[in-house]
Image (spheres, coloured by chain):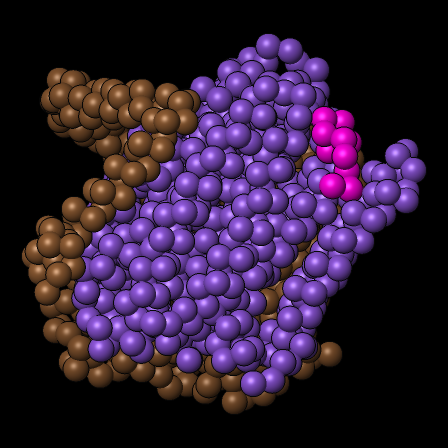
Amino acid sequence: MQLDLSLIVPEIAVAVLALTVLIFGMIIPAKSRQGLGWFTAVTLLGVLGLVIAGWDNMGSLYGGLYVVDQYSQFFKVIFLVAAFLVVLGSTRYVDRHLGGQSEYYSLLLFATLGMMVMTSAGDFMTIYLGLELMTIAFVILVCFRRLESKSLEAGMKYVLLAGMSSAVLLYGLSLVYGITGSVVVSEVGGRLAEVGANPLLMLGLVMLLAGLGFKISAVPFHMWSPDIYEGAPTPITSYLAVGSKAASFAVLIRIFIVGMEGVALNWELLLALLAAVTIIVGNLVAIPQTNIKRLLAFSSIAQAGYILVGMVALDPEGGVKGIMFYGFLYVFATLGAFTVAAHFYNKTGSDEIKDYAGLAQRSPLMAAVMVIALLSMAGIPPLAGFVGKFYLFMNIVDNYLWLAFIGLVMSMVSVYYYLRVALVMYRNEPLDDTPIAVSGPVSVTLILTMVVTVFLGIYPGPLSEIVNSAAHSFFMH
Amino acid sequence: MVEFALHNAWLVPLLPALAFVIIIFLTKPWPALSGLVSVGGMLTSCFFASLAAYGVFTNHKYAEEPLVYATRWFSAGDLKIDVGIQLDPTSAMMIFMVTLVSSLIFIYATGYMKGDPGYSVFFSYLALFGSSMLLLVLSSNLLQMFVAWELVGLCSYLLIGFYTHKISAREAAKKAFVTCRVADFGLLLGILSLQIVFGTLNLTELAEKINNFDQYTTMGMMTLMAVLVFIGPIGKSGQFPLHVWLPDAMEGPTPVSALIHAATMVVAGVYLVGRMMFLFHEVPSAMELVAITGAFTALFAASIAITQREIKRILAYSTVSQLGYMMLALGVGSLTASMFHLWTHAFFKALMFLGAGSVLHALHDKADVWKMGGLIKKMPITGYTFMIGCLAIAGIPPFAGFWSKDEILLAAFDNGNYVLFTMAAITAFMTAFYMWRLFFLAFMGEEKAENHPHESPWNMTLPLVVLAFFATVGGLVGTPWAPVWGEWIFFGHPHHVEPNYLIMVGSVVLGMAGIYLAYTLYLADKEKARAHALAKQYRFLHNLSFNKFYIDEIYLWFNHSIVDGAARLFYLFDIYVVDGILINGIAAFTRLSGEGLRVAQTGRLQNYALVFFLGVLALAVVLAFTDPATAFGLMTGGAK
C-alpha cells in the first residue's frame, strides 16, 4: 500500500482553492469581491489543465479505495468544464442577486470536489463521502437567494428529500456489505460469484438504485427536481442538472457494471424499464410547462432517461462509451440553455416562456444559443445530440429494440415542446422590443457552448476516440 | 511549396469557405471589403490549386496512383466514414479550372453587381458555391461528395433566386432545387446500396472491390446501383428529361449563370460519372444508358436552341447540349474525351455567359437577340471575345472546342455505334448554326437606333480577355499529334488516338456549313425574309422547338392532373384519417397524459416522499416478478 499523491493533485488543488476563496472573501473589501469569480474561473482552468496533464497517470490508492483511471479523469474534465462555464456565466448574476460571493464560489468548488471524489471512489464509504459533500454544498447553494421564499422552500425540500434518499442509499449499501462482506466495489464483484442472486442482495440493489436514481432524477424518484430547479438560483440549477447528475451516473456505472456485473441479468431489465419510464414521463410532462426552468427540468429528466439506456447495452464498453459521450455534450447543451435562462431572468426578472417572445430580435445570440441547445437535446442532426443518441441507441437495438423504439418516439415528442420555445422566440412579436445586452463573460459562455455543440455534431471523431480509450481504461481492472 | 500545396490541398476548398464565414459574420456591412475578401479567397485558393496541379502534372506516378489522405470523420461499429482529399490528374485539372474560372467570374461580378443592395451577401454565396464545388471535386469518398453535392444544390438555389423581388427568379430557384433534389434521391439510394453491398464508400477501396464485384453481388444489383447513381447526374447535369431547370436558372444574376454553366454545378454530374467510371465500366447496359442519354440530350437541346430569342436562354440550351456531349463521351468509355471537353467548354462557355452579361449590362437587361444588332462597333472587346467563344464552340480549328469535340466524335466513331456518332455530328452542325445565328443577330448587322450600348468597365472586360485566351489555346494540350491530355487523364490505360483526318475535316466542314447557313439567313439577308419564311413554312416544327417541345407543359399537366389528383385523394385521407384520428388523437393523448402526470407534481413534500418509497416498492416488485426465485426469497424474508 503506497500513497501516490500525484494521482490526487487535482482534488487537493480544488480543496485548497475552495478554502482560499473562502479566506479571500474575508480579507478582500466588499467592493472588489467581484474579482473572486474571475479568480475562480481562471484557477479552475488551471485544475483542468492538471487533470488533462495527468491523463495517462493512472493507478489506485489503498488497494482500490480510490481509483484514478481515464474513466474518472474524463468525468473530472466534465465537472471542471461545467464549473468553469457556470462560474463564467454567473459572475454578474451572483453580484446582482445573491451576494456572499466568496461563500458562493467556495461552495461551488466544494460541490465540484465532492463530484470528483465520487467518480474516483472505489469503495462505498468514499462514494458516500463524496456524495454527501456534494449534496450538502448544493443544499446551501439552492437556498442562496435567502430573501426569496421560493429559494428557501426549494432548499428545505432538497435537504429533506436528499436526506431521505441518502438514508435509502445507505441502507442499500449496508445490505450489500452484509451479504458480500466487502465495501470495495471491485471486491464486491468478486464475492458475488459465491453469493449469487440473494434476495437480500436484490433488496439492497433496489435501494441503491433508488438512492442514485434520486440524484439522476430518474422516474419515479424525480419528483423533487422540477421544484428545486425552479426555486434555486439558475446557475446552481444548471450545475445541479449537469454536475450532480454526471457524478451520480459515474457512481451508478461503477457500482452496477463493475460491482454488480455478476447479477446483471437481474437488474438489466429493471434499468431498461426505469429508462423507459423516465424517458416517457420526462418528455410528456415537459409539454404543458410554461416556465422555462421547469421545462428544462423535465427535459433534463428525459435526458437522464436517454443516458440510462447506455447501462443496458449489449456490449458494456460500448454502453459506457455512449454514456460518456452523451454526458459530455449534455453539459454544453444544458449549460447553454440555462445560461440563457439565467441571463434573461437577470435582465427581465422573468422565467416565463411567453416572455421570451421575439427574443430573436432582442438578442439574436441568446435566441440562437437556446435553439441550438434545445435542438441538440432533441437529437436533430447535425448537432451533437444526434450523434450522442446515435451512439447510445446503437448499442441496444440488438437486445432492447423496444427501448430504442420508445426513445425514438419520445424524441419526436420532445421536438414539439423544444420547438415551441423556438417558435415563441422567433415568430412572436416581442412584448417589449428593447434589445437585451449580453455582457462579455456571458457571451463567451454562450458562444462556447454553441460552438462545441455544433462542432461535436459535425466532427465527433476526436471526442469519440478519447471516450473510447477512457471507456477502455474503465474495463482494464 | 509545391509539396506543401500537394499535401494540404484541403486549403483549396477551405479558403473560399473561410471567405464565406468572414463575410457573413464580419464584413457584411462593407460591400467593397466583402467583394475583396471573396475575390481574395478565391485567388489564394487558385494559387494553391495551381501549385497542386503543377505538382501532380510533373510527377507521372500520380496518374497511376492518386494521392489520397484522409482523416476519420466518425465511426460507429463497422461503419467508418472518412473525410479526405483525393488528388489525381482529373481532380487536379478540375481544381485548377474551377478556381481559375471562378476567380475570373468573381472579378467580373465586382463590376456587374456594383450598387446592388445585396452585394456582400451575393459574394458570400459565390464563395460558398465555389468552395462546395471544390470540396466535391477533391472528395475521396462518396458520402463527403454527396454532402458537397447537396451544398452545391443549396447554393444554386440561393443564387438563382438571388433577386428575390422577381417572381420568375424565385420560381426558377425552386425549380432548380426541387428538380435536382428529385434526382439526388436516386443518387442517395445508389450511394446507400453501394455502402450496403461493398461496405465502403471510399473511392479507391470501392474501385478495388468493384473490380471483382461477383464476390459481393450480382450483375442485376450492379445495374440497379449504376442506374441509381446515374439519376443524380441526370438532374445535376441537366440531362433529358430533367434538363428543365437549367434554362430557367439564367434568372439569377449573370455571373451566377456563368458559374453554374461553366465551372460549378452542372459539370458536377459529368464529373461524378467520370469518378465512378469503375462502376459504370462493369455494367455495359448502364454505359449504353449514359451514352444514349448524352447523345439524345445533345441533339434535343440543340434543336431547341435554334429558335430561342433570349440570349442567355440560347446559351443555356447550348450548355445542356454540350453536357450531352460529355455524357456521350463517358458512355462510349472515353473519360479522356469527356474531361477534355469539360475543360475547354468551361472556358468558352464562361466567356460567352460573361459576354452576354456585358451585353445585358449595356442594354439594361434587354435580352432578345432580335432587338440587338451591330453591338460589336460600340463594344469591341465584348464582341470580339464573344466571337472567339463562338468559333470555339462551333469547332473551328485551332480554337479549343475543335480539339475536344473532335475527340468525342472520334471516341463515338471508334466505339462503333454509328447512330450515336451521327447524332453527335448533326449536333455539331446545329451548334455552329445557332451560335452564329446569335452572334450575327446580336453583334453584326445594323445598329438599332433605340439602343445605346457602351463598353463595360475593365473589371468586366479583363476576365473576358483572359477567358478568350484560354478558349483559343486551351485545346492545344490535347491535339491528336501531341496527345498530352490522354497521357494524364484516362480510365484504365492511357488513351492513344490516331489522328483521323476524315472526322477532323468532316467536323470542320459541318461547323463551317452551320456558320454559312446562319450567315445567309441572318446576316446576308438584311430583312431576314428567308428566316421568317422558313419559320412560317414549318410552323409546326418551329413552334415545337420554340416551346421547348412542351416539356414544361407536359410536366405541368402531369402535376395538375395526376399528381394533384392523387394529392387530393391523399389530402382527404390526411385530413380525416391521419390528422383526425392519428395525429390529433396522439397529440391529445400526449397532452392529456402530460397534464395528468403533472397533477402528481403537487409541490408537497409528503407526496414526493411517498412516491419515492412507492417507487422503491415498485422496483422490488418488478424485480420479484422478473425473477421468481427472488420473489419467493423476498416474501420469506430471505429465509432458506
Task: Pick the residue in front: A90 or B343.
Answer: A90
At x 59%, y 14%, the residue is A430
Residue furthest to the front: B639
Q: In this view, does B80 lie above or below B234?
A: below
Task: Pick the residue in front: A146 or B596.
Answer: A146
Q: Chain B drawn in what color?
A: brown
Determine whether, in the image, residue B153 is placed left or right of residue A204: right
Query: Is residue A374 visible to us here?
Result: yes
Task: Pick the residue in front: B352 or A136.
Answer: A136
Question: Chain letter for purple?
Answer: A
At x 49%, y 22%, the residue is A291
User: Residue B358: percent from the left, percent from the top?
Assistant: 65, 38
Looking at the figure, which quarter contains the N terminus of chain B? bottom right
Residue stretch in magenta: A94-103
Q: In this view, does B19 lie above or below A2?
A: above
Examine the structure image and report whether residue A96 is included in the region drawn in magenta.
yes
At x 69%, y 34%, the residue is B119
